[in-house]
Amino acid sequence: MQACSTRRRILAQGIRLAAACLLIAVDSHKPATAKTQKAALLYQNRPHEGQHCGDCKYFSPEGSGAGSGTCALVEGVIERDGWCVAYAART
Ligand code: SF4
């Protein structure tokens, strides 16, 4: 009886380990499309020490002369005059 209980316990642990490996494998294949929330990168709607989104390599204007646009890193619409800690000057 003891051996049967031990086998069942080992089998259950094996199944849990296989399930955990499967979850990790599935999670690692998610597309990397999610953007970061503004608050996480300390986004603000004003420039910071002369730096602003309009001069950042991650910024895309919505249209010609638009005061707003989108960012490759930050979710949602952002201001051309905004800024966040991920700022990287356009070269
Ligand atoms: S990374 Fe930051 S500074 Fe650059 S465009 Fe995106 S929000 Fe603006």
Image: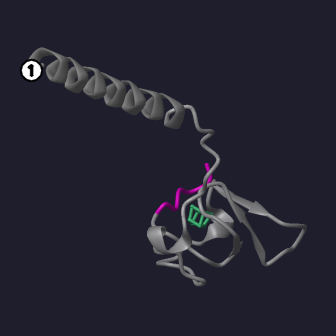
Where 76 falls versus 28 (above or below)?
A: below
Task: Report whether 62 appears left or right of 74.
Answer: right
What SS does tag 1 mark?
helix
Which residue is tagged 1?
2
Where 7 falls versus 65 (above or below)?
A: above
The residue furthest left is 2
The residue furthest bottom is 46
Say whether residue 30 is magenta: no
Mark 1 Cα-neighbour bin, 10 Å: few <14, some 14–19, many ≥20: few
Q: Nearer the viewer, residue 40 or 27?
A: 27
Q: Report the span colored magenta.
A: 86-91
Q: Residue 18 in the image: state x and y as whole percent.
A: 38, 24
Magenta stretch: dominant secondary structure: loop
Report if the beta carbon of the residue with label 1 is closer than 8 angstroms to ligand 1. no
Task: Report whether 33 appears left or right of 70.
Answer: left
Which quarter holds ligand 1? bottom right
Could you say which quadrant of the image residue 69 lies in? bottom right
